[in-house]
Image (cartoon, grey):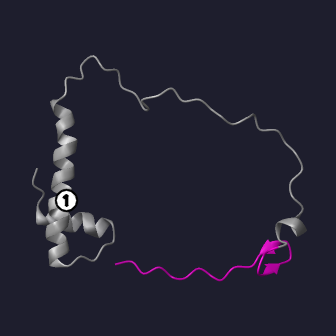
Amino acid sequence: MAISRDDVLHVAKLARLALTEDEVARLGEQLGAILEAVGKVSELELDDVPPTSHPLDLVNVWGEDEPRPSLPADDALANAPERDGDFFRVPPAAAVETP
């Protein structure tokens, strides 16, 4: 299934990718191959197959949650490079530039 150049550029913009013309062409081929592979599912006879969210039965391997005392703050922060009272001290978040 072919995918248009505009669709490739739209996907690249959503993924915040800056692509060269060669990369746009290559990505177009790759996305087309992916869409073709996914499109083969529509060729299958699935009328008798019930919808599922997972092919296997899900089993919760975790035990029940039981309240218990938490780790003391001094122990939790023992290896922190910097701390501010009972908190980790971290650098401020950098501003994220959006295209």
Residue 92: % across, % down: 63, 82
70 with respect to 26 (left or right): right
Image position of 24 (left or right of 55): left
In the drawing, does residue 64 fall left or right of residue 29?
A: right
Q: Which residue sits at x=54%, y=30%?
A: 58
User: At which x and y percent is residue 88?
Assistant: 76, 74
Task: Give the answer, above or below, for where 56 lies relative to 4.
Answer: above
Magenta segment, prevailing SS (helix, strand or loop): loop
Q: Quadrant of residue 39?
A: top left
Residue for point 16% across, 63% down: 28
Asked where in the image residue 9 lies, by quadrant, the reply is bottom left
Please give the name of the residue rendered at 75% of the width and 34% of the height, measured from the top-left corner: 64
Give the position of the C terminus as an image quadrant. bottom left
Task: Decide: is 88 above or below 43.
Answer: below
Q: Magenta segment, which residues?
A: 79-99
Q: Which quadrant of the structure image shows residue 76?
A: bottom right
Q: Residue at x 90, y 62 (%)?
A: 72
Residue nearest the observer in this picture, 34 or 99: 34
Amino acid type shown at disc 1: Gln
Q: Is residue 82 magenta?
A: yes
- Give SS at disc 1: helix
User: How many other residues sit within 10 Å of disc 1, few (<14), some (14-19) or many (≥20)?
Assistant: some
The residue that disc 1 covers is 30
